[in-house]
Protein backbone atom coordinates (compact mmCIF):
# COMPACT_ATOMS: atom_id res chain seq x y z
CA UNK A 1 0.00 0.00 0.00
CA UNK A 2 2.80 2.41 0.88
CA UNK A 3 4.45 1.62 -2.40
CA UNK A 4 1.26 2.49 -4.30
CA UNK A 5 1.04 5.81 -2.48
CA UNK A 6 4.68 6.54 -3.24
CA UNK A 7 4.13 5.64 -6.89
CA UNK A 8 1.04 7.89 -6.98
CA UNK A 9 3.05 10.76 -5.48
CA UNK A 10 5.80 10.26 -8.06
CA UNK A 11 3.25 10.19 -10.88
CA UNK A 12 1.57 13.35 -9.54
CA UNK A 13 4.94 15.05 -9.28
CA UNK A 14 5.80 14.04 -12.85
CA UNK A 15 2.39 15.21 -14.03
CA UNK A 16 2.93 18.61 -12.39
CA UNK A 17 6.34 18.89 -14.07
CA UNK A 18 4.73 18.05 -17.41
CA UNK A 19 1.95 20.60 -16.84
CA UNK A 20 4.52 23.27 -15.96
CA UNK A 21 6.64 22.42 -18.99
CA UNK A 22 3.57 22.54 -21.21
CA UNK A 23 2.58 25.93 -19.79
CA UNK A 24 6.08 27.26 -20.42
CA UNK A 25 5.86 26.04 -24.01
CA UNK A 26 2.45 27.68 -24.45
CA UNK A 27 3.83 30.93 -23.06
CA UNK A 28 6.76 30.73 -25.49
CA UNK A 29 4.41 30.07 -28.40
CA UNK A 30 2.32 33.12 -27.45
CA UNK A 31 5.46 35.21 -27.16
CA UNK A 32 6.71 34.07 -30.58
CA UNK A 33 3.31 34.68 -32.16
CA UNK A 34 3.28 38.22 -30.79
CA UNK A 35 6.82 38.80 -32.06
CA UNK A 36 5.75 37.47 -35.46
CA UNK A 37 2.76 39.84 -35.57
CA UNK A 38 4.99 42.76 -34.60
CA UNK A 39 7.50 41.91 -37.31
CA UNK A 40 4.78 41.48 -39.93
CA UNK A 41 3.35 44.87 -38.99
CA UNK A 42 6.80 46.43 -39.17
CA UNK A 43 7.39 44.87 -42.60
CA UNK A 44 4.04 46.23 -43.80
CA UNK A 45 4.96 49.69 -42.54
CA UNK A 46 8.28 49.51 -44.42
CA UNK A 47 6.47 48.43 -47.59
CA UNK A 48 4.06 51.35 -47.29
CA UNK A 49 6.90 53.79 -46.67
CA UNK A 50 8.81 52.41 -49.66
CA UNK A 51 5.73 52.88 -51.84
CA UNK A 52 5.37 56.49 -50.65
CA UNK A 53 9.03 57.15 -51.40
CA UNK A 54 8.71 55.59 -54.87
CA UNK A 55 5.84 58.01 -55.57
CA UNK A 56 7.91 60.95 -54.33
CA UNK A 57 10.86 59.86 -56.47
CA UNK A 58 8.61 59.56 -59.51
CA UNK A 59 7.22 63.07 -58.92
CA UNK A 60 10.72 64.49 -58.44
CA UNK A 61 11.92 62.82 -61.65
CA UNK A 62 8.96 64.31 -63.54
CA UNK A 63 9.74 67.72 -62.07
CA UNK A 64 13.42 67.36 -62.97
CA UNK A 65 12.54 66.45 -66.57
CA UNK A 66 10.16 69.41 -66.78
CA UNK A 67 12.90 71.78 -65.59
CA UNK A 68 15.41 70.27 -68.03
CA UNK A 69 12.97 70.82 -70.89
CA UNK A 70 12.19 74.33 -69.68
CA UNK A 71 15.89 75.18 -69.45
CA UNK A 72 16.48 73.77 -72.91
CA UNK A 73 13.60 75.81 -74.34
CA UNK A 74 14.87 78.97 -72.67
CA UNK A 75 18.39 78.33 -73.95
CA UNK A 76 17.07 77.90 -77.48
CA UNK A 77 15.04 81.11 -77.18
CA UNK A 78 18.06 82.99 -75.84
CA UNK A 79 20.20 81.66 -78.69
CA UNK A 80 17.56 82.66 -81.24
CA UNK A 81 17.54 86.27 -80.03
CA UNK A 82 21.32 86.39 -79.67
CA UNK A 83 21.53 86.65 -75.88
CA UNK A 84 24.52 85.36 -73.93
CA UNK A 85 23.02 82.92 -71.43
CA UNK A 86 25.22 83.86 -68.47
CA UNK A 87 25.36 87.62 -68.78
CA UNK A 88 21.91 88.36 -70.11
CA UNK A 89 23.45 90.64 -72.71
CA UNK A 90 23.70 90.37 -76.43
CA UNK A 91 26.79 88.47 -77.62
Image (tube, rainbow, N blue to C red):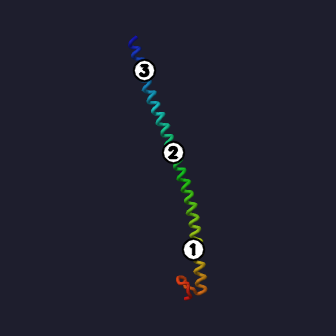
Give the structural element (helix, strand or loop) at label 3: helix
Percent from the top left, x then y, of residue 19?
46, 27
Question: Residue 20 — which label?
Answer: none
Asked if the residue under mark 2 is in contact with the one under mark 1, i.e. CB atoms within 8 Å, the reply is no
- Between marks 3 and 2 in the image, the one whose residue lies nearer the viewer: 2
Give me the C-alpha separation between circle 1 and circle 2: 45 Å
Closest to the observer: 8 or 57?
57
Residue at coordinates 41% horizontally, 18% vertically from top-left?
9
Above or below, comparing residue 58 to residue 80 in the picture: above
Q: Quadrant of the N terminus?
A: top left
Percent from the top left, x then y, of residue 80?
60, 85
Closest to the observer: 13 or 71?
71
Give me the C-alpha separation between circle 3 and circle 2: 40 Å
Q: Quadrant of the C terminus?
A: bottom right
Closest to the observer: 36 or 88?
88
Kindly identify which residue carries mark 2.
38
Kindly identify which residue carries mark 3.
11
Residue at coordinates 58% horizontally, 64% vertically from top-left?
59
- Of labels 1 and 2, earlier in sequence is 2
Question: Residue 68 — which label?
Answer: 1
Percent from the top left, x then y, of residue 4?
41, 14
Amino acid sequence: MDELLRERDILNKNMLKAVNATQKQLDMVKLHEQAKRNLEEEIQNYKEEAQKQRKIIFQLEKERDRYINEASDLTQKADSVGMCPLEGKQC
